[in-house]
Image (spheres, rainbow, N blue to C red):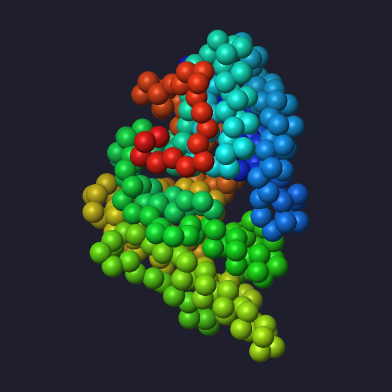
Amino acid sequence: MMNILAIESSCDDTAAAVVRDGRTVLSSHVSSQIEMHTIYGGVVPEIASRKHVEAISGLADRAVSEAGLTKFQLDAIAVTYAPGLIGAVLVGVNFAKGAAMALDLPLIPVHHVRGHIAANYITHPDLEPPFVCLCVSGGTTAIMDVRTYTDMAVLGGTQDDAAGECFDKVARVLGIGYPGGAPMDKLAQGGDDTKYDLPVPHVSGAELDMSFSGLKTASLNLIHNSEQKGEALDLPSFAASFGRAVSNSLVPRVISAAKMTGYGKIAVAGGVAANRRIRADLQAACAQSGDRLFLPEPRWCGDNAAMIGCQGFYEFQAGHTASWDLNAYATRDIALG
């Protein structure tokens, strides 16, 4: 039995959790900064870093206490070390190094996106590699070949903007909130998804790759042109059309990846995995293709430390621990871990 204290601070959420044996979440707490950053329409890195410093110690103590443990009953410390806002990631890494050193425990570095993939193990204890995973968030859009718990390869990805980033920027221009995924999803309910013709780019010669910059530009132009002409935009239908365009970029490609690998299993990870349109389209596509679909509960789609603890368990089993010179990285290849 292995109890891991996990720390996540890659963006604007400070999170701590205790996870047992990579599948059982004993406690999970997230301190959100959304209300503060909403004022600016996006995350302000310096503010995020300072708030992480204020919250992280108390949050870790709370996670251990609510897990019914003492700090001396912990077996390891796992932490997101990449990718993310460098100042924010550094706060978590330095706290984790201090905790591991003080308690004489192994320090486990975890790639943030690998953590998102591992969130599926919480909802689906029966899920085991190999499988294909669609990773979609504000900073990442990639189709992953998850060969083992720690051996992964990128099959396809975005050549420019991430899908979640597009949701955020369009929502900001519409003035409906930050981050943009949830308000866009809510706004789209009841809208006509065929009313606005938005592009679904094709990347020639890279069938599993995607591009979202054209969709973002077309959407922003549509909004601005409507404003300039004094024409009212049908917001629910626009949001539904936007969601349809994003889904039509993602779903066929992950189905193709599953067919190519022959695994018969598809998982989804990241904040955009909570989008109702994308989840519904994946369910329909998998029902037709015969692939088993694994969707994390919406509460595990966003940034949290439980997913870091889950992946940390498997990284530890693979011998992936760090020394006290562990550094934080703003970018890092998922395949390298």
Q: Position of residue 286 (x, y in %)?
A: 35, 58
Q: Residue drawn 66% across and 64% down?
A: 172
Q: Quadrant of residue 240?
A: bottom right
Work out whether residue 293 or residue 250 is closer to the camera in this orientation and state it.
Answer: 250
Work out whether residue 314 or residue 68 is closer to the camera in this orientation and state it.
Answer: 314
Q: Quadrant of residue 256?
A: bottom left
* Residue 21 in sight in this render: no
Q: Is residue 56 above or below residue 295?
A: above
* Residue 38 in sight in this render: yes
Q: Residue drawn 61% across and 83% down?
A: 225
Q: Quadrant of residue 185?
A: bottom right
Q: Position of residue 201 (x, y in %)?
A: 39, 70
Q: Position of residue 27 (x, y in %)?
A: 62, 29
Q: Residue drawn 72% across and 37% down?
A: 50
Number of numbered discs visible in the structure rendering: 0
The C terminus appears in which quarter of the rendering? top left
Q: Residue drawn 48% across and 60% down?
A: 161
Q: Position of residue 59 (x, y in %)?
A: 70, 29
